[in-house]
Image (cartoon, helix red, strand yellow):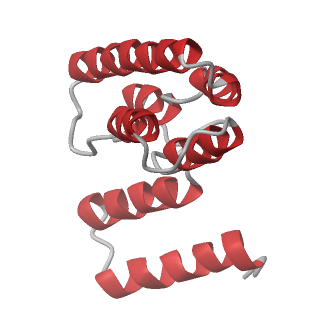
Amino acid sequence: MVGLEAYHIPYQAQYALWSDGVKRKSREWLHVVAELMEICAIRSLVDCPDTIKAMIESKKARLKKVIDYCQEKEFKRCVSYLENAREDMFTALENRLAGKTTSRVERLFRTVNMRVNVSKWSTEGALNVTKVRLAYYYNGFDA
């Protein structure tokens, strides 16, 4: 589960809640899903390492409260899902601290953007390189 995206955790938790018999759009369902959406939302423009560390700690504390809530309500499958996801849930933020990413596309765009800005690649040249690389990643096309 490395690099879980913000969308996947709340979406999969909805299935776990359903499996636990929690009625969709009930007060309990809305509480868990809304909290998870807030917890998983990543602010893309934050680049201060201390701020990112504080965000991670805050998100982990909120996640613990959601897990505790689910335990109180005896949502066993949701608890199990969140416990299993917890360790890798903030990988994207933690990788940002080290200048890394979990996505091939993000790495590609970071490299292309750097070359456009520093090496002065043309926009057309950058687009062509990006098309070839993405075709390789997703379609198995090899130039």
Q: Examine the rendered structure and indicate whether residue 15 appears above or below residue 141.
A: above
Q: Examine the rendered structure and indicate whether residue 65 appears above or below residue 111.
A: above
Q: Position of residue 110 (x, y in %)?
A: 40, 55
Residue 36: image quadrant is: top left
Q: Position of residue 142 (x, y in %)?
A: 76, 79
Residue at 21% across, 26% down = 48
Q: Nearer the viewer, residue 108 or 71?
A: 71
Q: With 89 as the anchor, is 143 left or right in this view? A: right
Residue 109: image quadrant is: bottom left
Q: With 139 as the anchor, is 33 left or right in this view? A: left
Residue at 23% across, 33% down = 47
Quadrant of the drawing holding the C terminus: bottom right
Residue 138: image quadrant is: bottom right
Q: Nearer the viewer, residue 53 or 114?
A: 53
Q: Position of residue 12 (x, y in %)?
A: 61, 46
Q: Examine the rendered structure and indicate whether residue 71 appears above or below residue 131.
A: above
Q: With 73 as the anchor, is 116 left or right in this view? A: left
Q: Position of residue 119 (x, y in %)?
A: 31, 63
Residue at 59% across, 74% down = 134
Residue at 46% across, 39% down = 29
Quadrant of the drawing holding the N terminus: top right
